[in-house]
Image (cartoon, grey):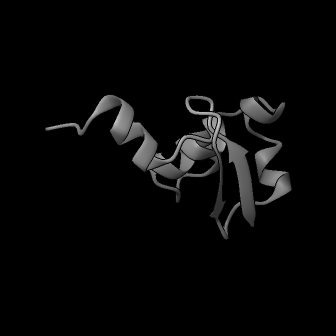
Amino acid sequence: MLITKTSEFTGVEHSLELPTVTEERLAKCWRYGGTEHIQDVFPELSSDEREFLMTGVTAEEWEEIFGVDEE
């Protein structure tokens, strides 16, 4: 599914193709009106992909704003 979101940090619109994401699964997530945590609904997605679903923030934006985690 092609997801288009506006970044909550920069206001820039981004799109990301996430084949395992469906409307039905999104509806289970609290951010989309459900009651489950996104990591429980989409364990196959990376943390960057889940962040994008929640906030529209890309991995590149996150790195620009917060830097790289050295751990």
Residue sticking out furthest to the left = 70
- Residue 51, x across and y down, in percent: 54, 41
Please name the residue shown 67% across and 70% down the image. Answer: 19
* Residue 61 figure quarter: top left
Q: Nearer the viewer, residue 65 or 40?
A: 65
Please name the residue shown 58% across and 45% down the image. Answer: 52
Is 44 displayed left or right of 12 in the figure? Answer: left
Is 37 displayed left or right of 24 in the figure? Answer: left
Is 67 displayed left or right of 24 in the figure? Answer: left
Q: Nearer the viewer, residue 36 or 63?
A: 63
* Residue 71 figure quarter: top left
- Residue 13, x across and y down, in percent: 68, 47
Q: Is residue 34 above or below residue 52?
A: above
Please tell me how many numbered marks the rendered image carries.
0
Q: Is residue 45 above or below residue 56?
A: below
Q: Is residue 19 above or below residue 11?
A: below
* Residue 18 figure quarter: bottom right
- Residue 59, x across and y down, in percent: 43, 48
Please name the residue shown 80% across and 35% down the image. Answer: 32
Please name the residue shown 84% across and 30% down the image. Answer: 33
- Residue 26, x across and y down, in percent: 77, 47
* Quarter of the image with the N terminus in it: bottom right
Q: Is residue 65 above or below residue 20?
A: above
